[in-house]
Amino acid sequence: MRDSGRWEEAECDYLLARWLFPNSRRLYIDCMALAVPRGAKLFEARELGSPESLCETIAEQYGLQVRRDAPPSQAIDIAFSTMVG
């Protein structure tokens, strides 16, 4: 479904697939690419659960620096275009 651009329908399929195959790296990448935009719709910016709060948590745990001046990324396009097969 990702090739059709029907992201909300694809998200349900990927969530089921992740439940069935929890150790699939490819499915993990696809689900994250779909989960981030969903989080942006569900939460206010910087609210717990928003992509910004996820980014801050990752930065805190792994010592990464968050660039506040960076333009919004195209997470879905980037994730899907870098997959093999």
Image (tube, rainbow, N blue to C red):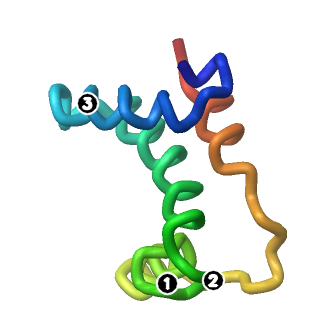
The N terminus appears in which quarter of the rendering? Answer: top right
* Camera-side residue of 3 and 68: 3
Q: Are marks 1 and 3 in contact (CB under 8 Å)?
A: no
| Amino acid type, residue under disc 3 in the picture | Leu
Q: Name the residue under label 1.
A: 56
Q: Closer to the camera, 22 or 15?
A: 15
Q: Residue at x 70, y 38 (%)?
A: 77
Looking at the image, do the residues carrying marks 2 and 1 touch, with CB atoms under 8 Å apart?
Answer: yes
Q: What residue does disc 2 label?
A: 66
The residue under the point 50% across, 67% down is: 42
Residue sitting at x 44%, y 36%: 11
Q: Is residue 27 above or below residue 36?
A: above
- Report the residue marked by disc 3: 16
**Which label number is shown at residue 24?**
none
- Position in image of residue 72 (x %, y %): 77, 65
Q: 10 Å neighbourhood of mark 1: few (<14), some, or many (≥20)?
A: some
Q: Which of marks 2 and 1 is nearer the N terminus?
A: 1
- In the structure shown, which secondary structural element does the residue marked by tag 1 occupy? helix
Label 2: state its secondary structure. Answer: loop
- Crowding at mark 3 (Cα within 10 Å: few <14, some 14-19, many 20+): few
Residue 62 placement (x, y as % from top left): 40, 78
Quadrant of residue 73 within the rendered picture: bottom right
Q: Distance between the residues labelled 2 and 3?
A: 32 Å
Q: Is residue 76 positioned above or below 20 on the image?
A: below
